Image: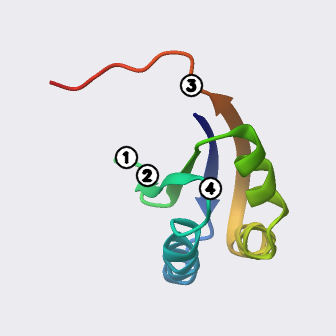
Amino acid sequence: MFCYLIKIGIKKYKTDELLDSLETFSDQFQNDRGCLGYNIYRDCHNPLSYTVVGEWQTFLALQQHFQAHNFKILIGAVKVLGESSELLTAETVSSAKMS
């Protein structure tokens, strides 16, 4: 499995706008071929800090997602509505099972 994390520091008065964008794309991305999950998290200590996690079955599916029109629009929204952002990618090397 491959994933990406987008860490976003949101501008103070742009939270609702950015969340609307993230949630709109969440529905679309979860229907994309190879998408295993797409989640949005808010930091427990900083309400202006969010993390988006997208999980993909293969590296090719992840690369195709990065090239998709909607992903590029999402990144544009993050740049306009956010104060800071960072995109990280990773591959699963071990997974713990929850009991």
Q: Answer with mark 3 or mark 2, whichever residue precedes in sequence.
A: 2
What x and y, as percent, mark residue 27? 49, 75
Find disc 1 in the rendering and name its residue.
45
* Left-right relation of 42 to 83: left
Label 4 to label 1: alpha-carbon separation: 14 Å
Q: Residue at x 57, y 34 (%)?
A: 1
* Label 3 close to label 1 by CB (< 8 Å): no
Q: Residue at x 67, y 40 (%)?
A: 58
What x and y, as percent, mark residue 16? 49, 81
Q: Residues within 10 Å of mark 4 (few under 14, many from 20)?
A: many
Q: What's the amino acid at mark 2?
A: Asn
Q: Quadrant of residue 70?
A: bottom right
Label 2 to label 4: alpha-carbon separation: 11 Å
Find disc 4 in the rendering and name its residue.
8
* Label 3 close to label 4 by CB (< 8 Å): no
* Left-right relation of 95 to 5: left
Q: Residues within 10 Å of mark 1 (few under 14, many from 20)?
A: few
Q: Residue at x 14, y 24 (%)?
A: 99
Label 3 to label 4: alpha-carbon separation: 22 Å
Find disc 3 in the rendering and name its residue.
92
Find disc 2 in the rendering and name its residue.
46
Q: Residue at x 64, y 50 (%)?
A: 6
Q: Answer with mark 4 or mark 1, whichever residue precedes in sequence.
A: 4
Residue closest to the far left: 99
Q: Residues within 10 Å of mark 3 (few under 14, many from 20)?
A: few
* Label 2 close to label 1 by CB (< 8 Å): yes
* Left-right relation of 52 to 88: left
Q: Nearer the viewer, mark 2 or mark 4?
A: 4
Q: What's the amino acid at mark 1?
A: His
**On screen, 93 above or below 81?**
above
